[in-house]
């Protein structure tokens, strides 16, 4: 059995996949942890009655991180997207019992299932996760039918369960 899809990946779709992966990866987002600690430090310093300027600076920086983190990630993601030519080419992905074949522009790769750790399914697509912070994204819109998506889910869960 070989399942094959073709698609062009759009930046909004790519960013949504990155954000989904990030939410799945962290129980508490790093920026909330850092900003929470800064706010807590600011409050402690303020209540102690010493270092009022430092307390204010900690609170302001903590609040700024909370407010600007998503915008910064969006901007950084857009820059990464614009600089990487492979994101702008047509993607051909074929999954079979042997592994996953990718053709993106002139780049071709054949990856064994052992390369992947797990499959995440977002509302918009499938993320084949490898390494600590990487994934290959296949949008659901690329699949011809719900049946084809079901076959893909079954194949991936069978192949990744064996590892």
Image: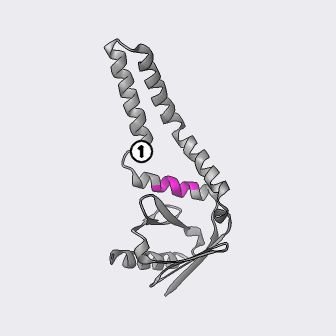
How far across and down, in percent of the image, does residue 156 sit?
42, 76
Which quadrant of the figure has residue 81?
A: bottom right
Above or below, 119 against 12 in this view is below
Residue for point 61% across, 53% down: 80
The overriding secondary structure of the stretch rendered in magenta is helix
Q: Quadrant of the C terminus?
A: bottom left
Above or below, 123 against 37 in this view is below
Q: What count of labels does the image hold?
A: 1
Residue furthest top as drawn: 49
> Per the image, is 113 magenta?
no
Residue for point 52% across, 75% down: 146
- Report which residue position mark 1 lands on: 29
Which region of the structure is painted magenta?
Answer: 15-21
User: In the figure, is residue 84 to the left or right of 150?
Assistant: right
Nearer to the camera, 57 or 2: 57
Which quadrant of the figure has residue 5?
A: bottom right
How far across and down, in percent of the image, does residue 43 sit?
36, 21
How far across and down, in percent of the image, does residue 54 sit?
43, 19
How far across and down, in percent of the image, does residue 38 sit?
40, 29
Does dot 1 land on a helix, a strand or a loop? loop
């Amino acid at each position: 059995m070989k399942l094959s899809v073709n698609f062009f990946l759009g930046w909004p779709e790519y960013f949504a996949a990155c954000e989904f992966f990030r939410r799945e990866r962290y129980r508490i987002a790093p920026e909330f942890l850092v900003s929470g600690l800064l706010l807590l430090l600011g409050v402690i310093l303020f209540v102690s009655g010493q270092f009022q300027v430092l307390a204010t600076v900690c609170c302001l920086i903590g609040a700024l991180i909370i407010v600007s983190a998503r915008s910064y990630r969006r901007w950084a993601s857009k820059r990464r997207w614009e600089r990487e030519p492979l994101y702008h080419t047509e993607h051909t992905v074929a999954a079979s019992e042997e592994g996953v074949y990718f053709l993106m522009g002139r780049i071709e790769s054949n990856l064994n299932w052992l390369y992947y750790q797990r499959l995440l399914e977002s509302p918009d697509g499938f993320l084949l996760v490898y390494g600590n912070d990487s994934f290959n994204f296949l949008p659901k819109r690329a699949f011809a039918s719900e049946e084809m998506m079901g076959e893909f889910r079954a194949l991936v869960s069978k192949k990744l369960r064996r590892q």
